Every structure is written in structure tokens, then in C-alpha cells.
Amino acid sequence: MSGKLGAAKVSIFVNIGLLISKIIVAIITGSIGLWAESAHSFFDLLASALAYLGIRKAEEPEDHSHSFGHEKFENLSSLLQALLITGTSFVVLFEAYQKLSGPANIEFSEAGIALMLVSIPVTYLTSKYLGDIAKKEGSSALEADSAHFTTDVISSVAVLGGLVLVRLGFSFGDPVGAIIVGLVMLYISAHLLLQSFYVFMDFSPDRKMMGRIRAVLESDKRITRYHKLRARMAGSRILVDVHIHVPHEMPVKEAHTISHEIEKRILNEVPQVKEVSIHIEPD
């Protein structure tokens, strides 16, 4: 099992534990904020499952129907996550808005406060773990999953603040906390939709990434120039295509060796790049 799949499994188990505990305490307290958090955790669990399936599919080798691999299945899972979270966020916001006019009585708010105090550090540590693996393995699905847990920390703090206000006698604190949870969910979904849009539309990497690729080409004095440098994102991979020019009297074997060395340098110095196609032209 790859590190990415192992991390996705950890995410699933953590989300299951958080979801069960939040539902139990939401039933005990009747808190709309905790019900919103439960909905948030449910879709986080669904998102983690989609991430796991997306990573499994993305790791399959190229075949006759997918010559460039299956990397975009990770981004497809992120897109589905975003659509699910968007719908849930509107439901949460609508319910919380209705509760503002007549906040319900919250019983045993101490149970909710205790749960939030436990779930916040658990969520933070899980987010950090997933983020580290995503950065190391180059996984867009895990990066999205890590973002879910990061915003979970924010929404859990909002719910905690709302329950503390309820405990102090301010009943509006609970629906206000739920509204913050809904807004956080909406922000996540917008971010994931935008990221998926970039990949599916074959956007080029950012200028910094392209600059690193150009630096490799420009530092090799054996080529006279280069042109038609193109790159596109395919899931967590970056695919590069470039034409290099060599002196017209250079032997084909030597030019071929140079192209291989440049390819290896780009792959080593820009780890996000997974495939480089170099065309050789005489100057």
C-alpha cells in the first residue's frame, strides 16, 4: 500500500470517530451547531472515501484507454466532494438562519464543549499529517482532504464559541456558530471547485513552477536555444513538452544524450514534473 492510500485510510477512520461522537452529542444537547458539525463531518467522511477511491484509481498504470495515466481521477474525487459540500452548506445556513429568530434551548452544553475541546486537537493533527503526506507524495486528493480537516478546526472553534455563549446565557451563540460552519463549508467547496477547474481545463502551472523549468533549460549551454515550452497539470502530475535547438553539426547520438540529461535534471529539480517530452531540432 502506498503512503497516499495509507493516509487516506487514516482520514476515513478519524472521520468515522468524529462523526459518531458529534451525532451522539448533538442528540444529547440538541445543538444546531453540533448538527451542522455532524453534517460537515459526514461529508468529510464521504470526501475521504472519494479521496481513497480516487487515489487507488489514479495509481493504476497507463492503459489503452488512458495513455497519460489515471491521475485526474484524484481531481474528479475533489470535484464530487466540492459539489456535495456546497449543497450541505446551503442547508446548514438555511437551518441556522431560521434558528436565529427563535434559538432552541441547549441541554448539557458541557458535553458539546468537552467534545469540541477533544476534537479540535485531533482534527488539527490529522490535517497536519495529511498535508505532510500530500506535499511529499504530490496528491491533490489528500491536499483537499487536509484542507477539509483544517477548516474543521475553524468550524469546531466556532461551535465551541457558540456553546460557551449558550452556557453564559446567550442563546444566539449556537445558530451563529452553525452559520460560521456553513460559511466555512461554502469556502472549501469554492476552493475545491476552482482547483478542479484548473486541472480539467489543462491550465499551465504557475509562473514560479515554469520559471524553475526554464532555469534548467537556460543553464545548459550545450543547447543554443529552446522554444514551444509547454506544461499542463494532469492530476498531481505536471507534463512538460519543449523543443531544444543544438548546433547542426552535432551528432544525433550526442544530441539524444543531451536531451535525456536535461529531462533527468527537470525531473530531479522540479519533482512535481512527472513526464518530459523533448524534441530536438538543428540550429
Image (cartoon, rainbow, N blue to C red):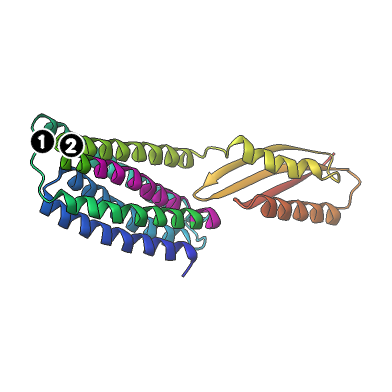
> Is 64 situated left or right of 188 in this image?
right
Q: Is residue 12 above or below residue 158?
A: below
Does the magenta run of residues contain 145? yes
Q: How far across and how far down the image is residue 218, in percent?
A: 78, 40
Residue stretch in magenta: 134-161
Q: How far across and how far down the image is residue 131, in percent?
A: 47, 53
Does the magenta run of residues contain 139? yes
Q: Are marks 1 and 2 in contact (CB under 8 Å)?
A: yes
Q: How far across and how far down the image is residue 21, in percent?
A: 21, 59
The 10 Å Cα crowd at callout 2, few under 14, some 14 to 19, many 20 or more, is many
Q: Is residue 60 above or below residue 270?
A: below
Q: Residue at x 74, y 41 (%)?
A: 215
Q: Is residue 4 above or below residue 37?
A: below
Q: How far across and how far down the image is residue 63, in percent?
A: 50, 61
| Element under disc 1 | loop
Residue 180 appearing in the image: yes
| Element under disc 2 | helix
Q: Mark 2 sits on what residue? A: 175
